[in-house]
Image: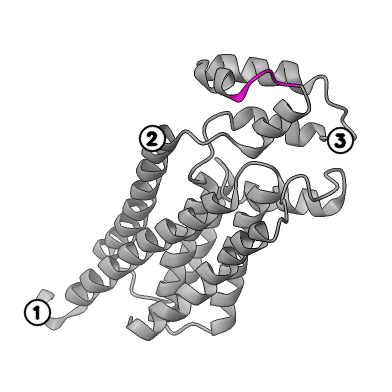
Amino acid sequence: MNLRLLLFVIVLLIVPVALASLAWQWDLHWFPLLDLDEPPALLAYAMTLTVGKLGIGFTLLALSALILHRWRSQPRQLLVFFFCLFAALGSAFVTKTVAKLYFKEPRPYVLWLVQQDKLADSRRFYASPEAEREHELQQSLSRVSDNQIPDWLKHHWQEEVNYSFPSGHSIAAMTIAGFFCLMLGYRRKPVWIMLTLAGWAVAVCYSRLLLGLHWPADILASSVLGLLFGAAGAWSFVVLDRRLASPESS
């Protein structure tokens, strides 16, 4: 792993997400931008699900199998690999949780519902306990046509009643992408695999904008943080892996 590889990964992951903030400066409002009952919205939702409660497990399993296939498989090296990976993800999760409680940024869909007179006030909404927010949101969304907001998106909003900044899905996707892109480079895997992985992570970030869950600043900050955590995890593994593979350790 070297500086050139790290800079390449930064360009792959951060620059495309930064374009969302530029588009926002040009008065492009990401939500509501899609026709939410059309296939592009379902594709965005599918991207979100890849780092959801169930999807993230399958994502990590597939990427770990790709990296570890036909590689050194000593138990202690596998242990170090997964320790570094989950330490990076755990650090990202803790940072995301603390930051949400500190910044207390309302989600775009909450402000949209206030504008549509479906919610009375965003401050009162967030002042309520989480269970009450879910109930209030359910009542509010029952007055919104399914043609305007599909049932699957209403259900997803009801699962996301916490604050907006930063984006948990984006920071998870970027931590995973940062870690595995650097590991792919370390293993000298084909570049197209890194490009595909980066495209997936960027798509997850944009899906959060298009579905009304986050602002451009949320996903940009999350991308930077995620890459930092992913890079730290990958760098830690490379250092430890080289020590374990050295003749002195045998």
Q: Residue at x 54, y 23 (%)?
A: 126
Q: Which residues are magenta?
A: 118-122
Residue 148: mark: 3
The label nearer to you, 2 versus 1, is: 2
Is residue 230 rendered magenta in the image?
no
Q: Earlier in the sequence, mark 2 or mark 1?
A: 2
Regarding mark 2 in the picture, which secondary structure is present there? helix
Q: Determine the CA span between mark 2 and mark 3.
A: 33 Å
The residue that label 1 is drawn on is 248
- List the single residue furthest toward the left: 248
Residue 120 percent location from the top left of the image: 68, 18
| Residue type (three-letter) at the residue carrying disc 2 | Tyr
Q: Residue at x 59, y 32 (%)?
A: 160
Tell me if mark 1 has few (under 14), some (14-19) or many (20+) residues whose alpha carbon lies within 10 angstroms of its own.
few
Please say which color scheme the image uses.
Answer: one colour
Q: Residue at x 57, y 61 (%)?
A: 201
| Residue type (three-letter) at the residue carrying disc 1 | Glu
147 on left or right of 95: right
Residue 153 percent location from the top left of the image: 74, 36
Residues at discs 3 and 1 in contact (Cβ within 8 Å)? no
Res. 69 visible in picture: no
Residue 34 percent location from the top left of the image: 81, 50
- Image quarter of residue 205: bottom right
The label nearer to you, 2 versus 3, is: 2
- List the single residue furthest toward the right: 147
Residue 102: mark: 2
Q: Determine the CA span between mark 2 and mark 1.
A: 47 Å
